[in-house]
Amino acid sequence: MTRPDTPATTSTAPPERAAEIPHRASARRASGATARRGPADPVKTLLHDHRALCERAVDPLEIAAGLEAHGLTDRTAARYRHRDVFALAEELYARMPPRAHAPAFGGAPGTRPGPGPGTDGWAGWTLLALLPGAACLATAGLLRVTEGVLGDGTRALVTVLGALLACLALRACLGRGPLRAPEGAGRAGMYACWLLSYAVYGEELLAQVMTGGPDGPWGGSPAPLLGLAAAVAPAAWCAHLFTVRAHRKLSGSRALEEFGAGVRPLLLAAVSLFLGALLPLLYLADLALGGGGVPVAAVALGVLFFVARLLAVHGLPEPGTVALAAACAVEAAAPALVLGARLPGLEPLAQPVDALVSAGGTGGVSALACGGAALALLLHAALALSRASAHTRV
């Protein structure tokens, strides 16, 4: 008996519904793939979020620095299908409308010139950097030549006039060249005046306070002031060299980590070079004025000033101001603790100062204050100045 043939396939859906099934399946697959991949053009979204930055940038370096300042790293650049922030900045820059003088990335012809002797007028700011030391040297020489001839009042007037000329020369120097801070230095000038005054008169004042005084006018040691004023010129050149080298390193780097690893040795070299110039100047100043040797506190103070100004030059004045204020607080606390210990029941207040002076003399207070602040600020600068965003403002 023969069985009737059965159809090979059976479809219960209408022809129209059957035709829609493959289409819906492909649509679901496409939407699932899009959800896994994210936006079709993530760079477009980033460009929309940072359009103002990209419009005002004159080269991709500024875009890369701005993205880094907003927290974008080489690792997060992978979300935008780029190997690093520099490559991402190149694409963002290329997507903007053509510029009249569009420079190339990485130092090619047409790149925005970095800071250098030719662009900043090195002869002018070098001359200005020599003026504070020249003013202090002329004042010290005049006081030495007229010793025993001029009265105390006249010598005090000469000292005040010399200090005023040195301050004016320093102000002119800090307003131009590699030591110019584009955003100002805040209250750093006030703290610097305190630290310089303490470098001249602080040790004698502390000595009198610890022996029951102060008993009257105390003598000063102008040698540190002369050496620090003369060190303004090498400080300007060291800051200039660091800025130029860092800018070249930024132009040739292809990753933020690579740039940071290359800038930190440059910072250490600049500080070491400045220290190598500061020590002989302090020694010569001490030799000329008949002091008792180069104080460690003056060396630490010079390094503190240099690192604080270097940060201010690169748009970061706040850390330097905090470090200078901390050093001032320590120096002011030492005689205050000794005076407070004279009150009944507060004798232990003077013990830390007594121990410090016993170990390092009256200069130990200033050495500890300035040395600790300089070391902490240098560690901070090693991190802050290794960011690309710190080198697009100079």
Image (cartoon, helix red, strand yellow):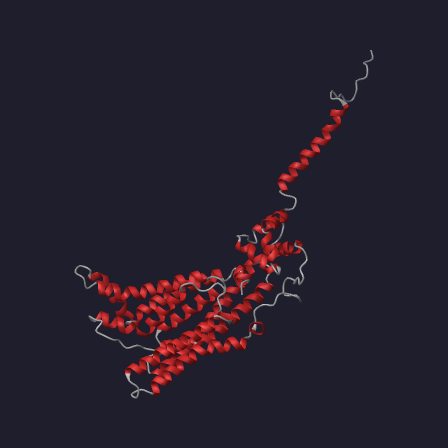
Q: Position of residue 164 (x, y in %)?
A: 39, 76
Q: Position of residue 54 (x, y in %)?
A: 61, 55
Instruction: Using the rendered view, name the quadrant where residue 186 is placed.
Output: bottom left
Determine whether, in the image, residue 193 is placed left or right of residue 176.
Answer: left
Q: Position of residue 327 (x, y in %)?
A: 35, 65
Determine whether, in the image, residue 111 is placed left or right of residue 266.
Answer: right
Q: Nearer the viewer, residue 200 or 82?
A: 200
Q: Nearer the viewer, residue 203 or 51?
A: 51
If the image is split into quadrants, where does the N terminus sit? top right
Q: Residue at x 81, y 14 (%)?
A: 4
Q: Position of residue 208 (x, y in %)?
A: 23, 72
Q: Residue at x 79, y 18 (%)?
A: 6
Please say if 94 is above or below 175: above
Q: How many marks?
A: 0
If the image is split into quadrants, where does the C terminus sit? bottom right
Q: Residue at x 37, y 65 (%)?
A: 372
Q: Residue at x 49, y 72 (%)?
A: 238
Instruction: Using the rendered view, name the quadrant where residue 221 is placed.
Output: bottom left
Determine whether, in the image, residue 2 is placed left or right of residue 326.
Answer: right
Looking at the image, the residue that sits furthest to the left is 344
Determine whether, in the image, residue 2 is placed left or right of residue 325.
Answer: right
Please say if 8 is above or below 38: above
Looking at the image, the residue that sits furthest to the right is 2
Instruction: Using the rendered view, name the quadrant where residue 209 is placed.
Output: bottom left
Residue 273 visible at all:
no
Residue 247 visible at all:
yes
